[in-house]
Amino acid sequence: MTGCVLMVSSQGGHLAQLLALRSWWGERDRLWVCPDTADVADRLCGERVVHSHAPTTRNLPNLLRNAVLGARVLWRERPCLVVSAGAGVAVPFFAVAWLLRIPTVFIEVYDRVDTPTMTGRLCGPFTTRRIVQWDSQLAFYPDARLVGPLL
């Protein structure tokens, strides 16, 4: 795969799951979209990062700001792929990627084994490939690929 990979994440565990894929993304040209937090700054030191608007939970103004940011970043960078494990910031980026026909991969988080996450449900219509970490997650995402625990 050639071209930039856009990694979209919130801080904390969502970011940790994407970082666990370093063997996959480590040699690729990449750009991260994450909030401006100490956790993100520490974990992504030396990486190209565009700061998203936070918080995203039940925050319509930031949803709209992130949609504008998503359109600007995706248009400028033209990534070959958008990857996210959540949370809310993924939704506007996946929607814009879908409009631009850029493939997306959503990784359902490891700690939601009985029900899908809200972000997973909202990103669903815009997701090209869904990845799950547990057999039980296939019950609500039957089209997903099971990869096993990332952490």
Image (cartoon, rainbow, N blue to C red):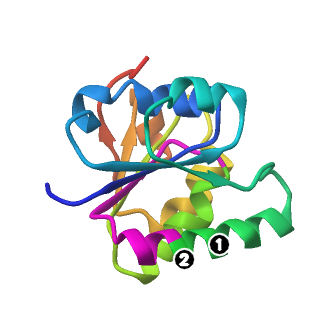
**For this rendering, which residue is in front, 28 or 133?**
28
Residue 21, image quadrant: top left
Q: Are marks 2 and 1 in contact (CB under 8 Å)?
A: yes
View extreme (left): residue: 1
Residue 4 among magenta residues? no
Q: Quadrant of the N terminus?
A: bottom left
Number of residues whose C-alpha sits closer than 10 Å to that of mark 2, classed few (under 14), some (14–19) or many (20 or more): some
- For disc 1, the marked residue is 67
Q: CA distance from mark 2 to mark 1?
A: 6 Å
Question: Viewed as shown, does residue 9 lie left or right of 63?
Answer: left
Which residue is situated farthest in the top direction here?
151
Q: Amino acid at mark 2?
A: Ala
Q: Is residue 62 left or right of residue 112?
A: right
Query: Image point 77% across, 50% down: which residue?
Result: 54
**Element at label 2:** helix
Q: Secondary structure at mark 1?
A: helix
The image quarter in which residue 87 lies: top right
Q: Is residue 72 above or below residue 10?
A: below
Most foreground residue, 55 or 105: 55
Q: Which dot marks residue 71?
A: 2
Query: Residue 82 colored magenta?
Result: yes
Occupied quadrant, residue 41 = top right
Where is 84 relative to 3, above or below? above
Relative vertical location of residue 126 with respect to residue 48 in this rendering, above or below: below
Q: Amino acid at mark 1?
A: Ala
- Residue furthest out toward the bottom: 99
Span of residues in magenta: 73-87
Residue 114: horizontal and vertical position, in percent? 60, 31
Q: In this image, 100 relative to 65: left or right?
A: left
Residue at point 50% right, 46% down? 140
